[in-house]
């Protein structure tokens, strides 16, 4: 039997926005524990939790001050251990987020570095450099806007590819490597099933610190030859980590956040002795267009097959505009999102569901400036709205905010329109988005065809995608503007599930997907 992670459906829990147990307006680990029955009944296989470690929250917890504890806002270490046990009791695996590229500026190591002189052991754990006169060491820019260097009192500069509160670690340093080996073992010993690795393509930097050249952007998919993204040296780190994970029972796993332009470069992270899987940004970024979606699917499968790794499929996460909105918003976006869910969940490999996508939540685009928290919004003076709009707390029940999220006011305001999208409102409605996800996940778990096996494209009209998964499963997606008949190979099969009702003659309306079984 193949390892669970090769075909798992993993649900992303953005902890601060999932469920609030104590009324402070922020989701917490106790809230996650209270909703485990919902996730079990939804039909997912595992959970990925965004960071809950002690942190000043300059970047929503991706500025970690202590990798071996829990921020009091989210609970205690004992609650994290209880969450692992409870999830396992419900048959759910648990993946924690790991942030190895940088720490918080309040991490004890960085405080020691500021107190120590240039050239010291304490500073060698980070990337401190002398400037060019009054200028920083090079022209590197922060992914959140502004330059990537901050100057300290003695005149040296330190690198932060994200916020100034997130100083980059130096991964050529033996102490850094040893520390993260210890962190991995700390959580593996407590039963965690794996780690999602933040900015996995960013740990190695060009030691010459050369300037960014033309076409070498700070954000977006990295191109080959970039001085601080996707350097070959980063692979040594993951070979080291793989030896640790392989020493534990239960198929422990790593999934990398690897944002590179070339699927072949992505595949290098997934060689048999490195990471197990990686997020598929090629598929996520594809527009709602049959040709673009097919190209993204083919590129991804081809690249992963070359190294024996499974593809993964994802439509949304905590860093991108929710796909209901990306696909056009309103009724059109929701209809396309329903079809996209059936497409994603029928592809070979694994899949990720971002919390709230199973409810059809759209991006919240009208958050007041004074309530926003994403550093991107502030470092670009509002030119980039940031990521808060996809992080608004979930609506569980009721007709008014906070919709059962917790007993108190939520940390970001929920729209009045979400009263129609709560879990309670949708449960029991066979036409709802959450019912579609539950039914699709139930079939996916039961059908041998919907695991890792190959897929075969069927000839169709230009705006239609259709493929077969053996034995006897077919998926058809009409991404066009006009009704479309399923291809001839499908017409003798039984309709299993459709994202929206089909025509009386079996045609698929625009923006509709259907599953069939022989």
Image (spheres, rainbow, N blue to C red):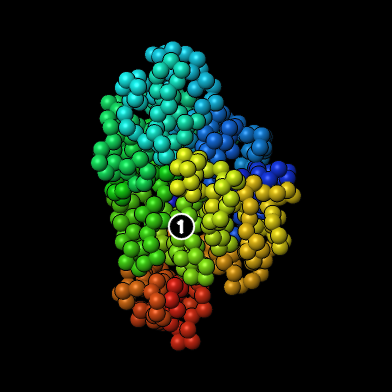
How far from the left and from the top, in percent, is residue 31?
67, 47
Instruction: Using the image, determine if residue 235 lies above or below residue 278.
Output: above
Instruction: Using the image, determine if residue 470 lies above or below residue 70.
Output: below
Please name the residue shown 45% across and 28% down the image.
167
Using the rendered view, name the quadrant where residue 474 is placed: bottom left
Decide which of 363, 490 is in the foreground and name it.
363
Please name the residue shown 66% across and 69% down the image.
428
The answer to whether any part of residue 41 appears in the image is: no
How far from the left and from the top, in percent, is residue 291?
32, 66
Disc 1 secondary structure class: loop
Disc 1 target residue: 315
Left/right of residue 269 with respect to residue 27 in the rendered view: left
How far from the left and from the top, in percent, is residue 518?
44, 76
Please name the residue shown 73% across and 48% down the image.
408
Please name the residue shown 54% across and 60% down the image.
362
How far from the left and from the top, in percent, is residue 81?
64, 37
């Amino acid at each position: 039997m193949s390892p669970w992670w090769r075909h798992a459906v993993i649900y992303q829990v953005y902890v601060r926005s999932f469920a609030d147990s104590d009324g402070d307006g922020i989701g917490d680990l106790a809230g996650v524990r209270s909703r485990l029955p919902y996730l079990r009944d939804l039909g997912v296989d595992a959970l990925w939790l965004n960071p809950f470690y002690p942190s000043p929250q300059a970047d929503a917890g991706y500025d970690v001050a202590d990798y071996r504890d829990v921020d009091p806002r989210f609970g205690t270490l004992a609650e994290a251990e209880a969450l692992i046990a409870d999830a396992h009791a419900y048959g759910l695996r648990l993946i924690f987020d790991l942030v190895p590229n940088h720490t918080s500026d309040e991490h004890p190591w960085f405080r020691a570095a500021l107190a120590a002189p240039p050239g010291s052991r304490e500073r060698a754990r980070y990337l401190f450099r002398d400037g060019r006169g009054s200028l920083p060491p090079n022209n590197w820019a922060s992914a959140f806007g502004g330059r990537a260097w901050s100057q300290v009192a003695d005149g040296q500069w330190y690198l932060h590819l994200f916020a100034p509160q997130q100083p980059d670690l130096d991964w050529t340093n033996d102490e850094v490597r040893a520390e993260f080996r210890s962190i991995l073992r700390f959580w593996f010993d407590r039963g965690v099933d794996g780690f999602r690795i933040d900015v996995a393509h960013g740990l190695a930097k060009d030691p010459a610190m050369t300037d960014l050249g033309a076409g070498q952007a700070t954000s977006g998919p990295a191109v080959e030859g970039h001085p601080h993204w996707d350097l070959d040296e980063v692979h040594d780190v993951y070979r080291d980590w793989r030896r640790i994970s392989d020493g534990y029972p239960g198929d422990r796993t790593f999934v990398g956040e690897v944002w590179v332009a070339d699927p072949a470069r992505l595949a290098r992270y997934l060689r048999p002795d490195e990471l197990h899987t990686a997020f598929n940004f090629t598929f996520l970024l594809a527009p709602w267009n049959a040709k673009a979606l097919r190209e993204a699917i083919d590129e991804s499968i081809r690249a992963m097959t070359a190294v024996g790794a499974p593809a993964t499929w994802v439509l949304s996460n905590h860093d991108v505009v929710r796909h209901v909105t990306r696909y056009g918003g309103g009724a059109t976006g929701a209809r396309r999102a329903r079809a996209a869910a059936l497409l994603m969940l029928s592809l070979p490999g694994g899949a990720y569901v971002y919390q709230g996508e199973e409810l059809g939540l759209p991006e919240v685009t009208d958050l007041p400036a004074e309530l926003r928290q994403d550093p991107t919004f502030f470092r670009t003076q509002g030119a980039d709205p940031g990521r808060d709009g996809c992080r608004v707390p979930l609506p569980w029940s009721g007709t008014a905010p906070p919709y059962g999220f917790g007993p108190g006011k939520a940390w970001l305001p929920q729209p009045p329109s979400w009263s129609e999208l709560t879990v309670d409102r949708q449960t029991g409605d066979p036409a709802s988005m959450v019912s579609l996800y539950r039914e699709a996940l139930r079939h996916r778990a039961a059908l041998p065809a919907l695991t890792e096996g190959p897929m075969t494209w069927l000839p169709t009209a230009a705006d239609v995608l259709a493929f077969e998964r053996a034995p006897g499963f077919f998926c058809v997606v009409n991404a066009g503007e006009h009704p479309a008949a399923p291809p001839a190979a499908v017409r003798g099969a039984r309709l299993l599930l459709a994202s929206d009702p089909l025509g009386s003659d079996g045609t698929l309306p625009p923006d509709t997907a259907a599953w069939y079984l022989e």
